Each structure stands twice: as structure tokens, then as C-alpha cells.
Amino acid sequence: MSSIVRHVSTIFRCPSLVPNSLSCELQQWRGIRVKVFNGNLESALAVMQRKMQSSGIERLIKREQTHHIKNSEKRVLARKNLERRIRSQDLARKLKAILIKKVRGL
């Protein structure tokens, strides 16, 4: 759990050179606060994890991790990215065709 806290703290840390920068204010705005009731830390951690998942912080943390990625994982990630890009291009092509038909009045 301390590794997650460390990653979150490095993401939201303000640069010391420019303390009043806009990015610093935005990073502070995106912070997550969780209240611990009756010393129940487990439930507070569960709430924090749900909030992190819903706000997208968990994806930022995973993206910034610099651990070793196996070749098989790299192939799976590359295939997923390729499929995502192809789907996006197909959708863009279809939307373009629809818009051209609407503009031409067909």
C-alpha cells in the first residue's frame, strides 16, 4: 500500500521552482480525500481505491510504473493498441462518409 501512496504523492507534488503555477493548482484540485470513521482503515482504503478507479488516477499510476514488462505482455499491449487504433480509424472513416452524404444531401 505504501507504493501506491508514494506514487500518488509524486503525481500530486508541486514543483518547488514554481509554487504558484497553474499545473500545481490543477494537481491539488484533483486530490482525493477519504475520511476514516471509528478507526476503520480497511473500509477507508476500499473507498479510496474506488475513488481512484473512478477518477482515473489508477491509470496514471500504472502508466508511470517503470518495472520490467515481459515480452509477452508487450505483444499483448501492442496488439490491443493496434486493435484500438484500427477501430478508431474505422469509426472515423464511417463518420466521414455519413457527414459527406449529409452535406451533399443524399
Image (cartoon, grey):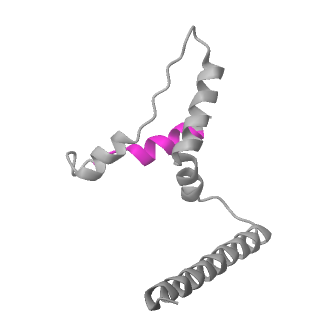
Task: Name which quarter of the figure residue 9 lies in.
Answer: top left
- Say left or right for 96 vs 30: right
Q: Is residue 1 above or below residue 67?
A: above
Task: Name which quarter of the figure residue 94 lies in.
Answer: bottom right
- Residue 1 position, x and y percent, is 62, 34
Q: What residue is shown at x 65% (from left), y 21% (from top)? A: 42
- Residue 2 position, x and y percent, is 58, 35
Which stretch did the figure color magenta? 3-15
Q: Is residue 56 above or below residue 88?
A: above
Task: Name which quarter of the figure residue 78 lies in.
Answer: bottom right
Predominant secondary structure, magenta span: helix
Residue furthest front in the image: 105
- Residue 6 position, x and y percent, is 51, 40
Viewer-nearest residue: 100 or 28: 100
Q: What residue is shown at x 55% (from left), y 83% (from top)? A: 98
Residue furthest top in the image: 38
Q: What residue is shown at x 64% (from left), y 21% (from top)? A: 43
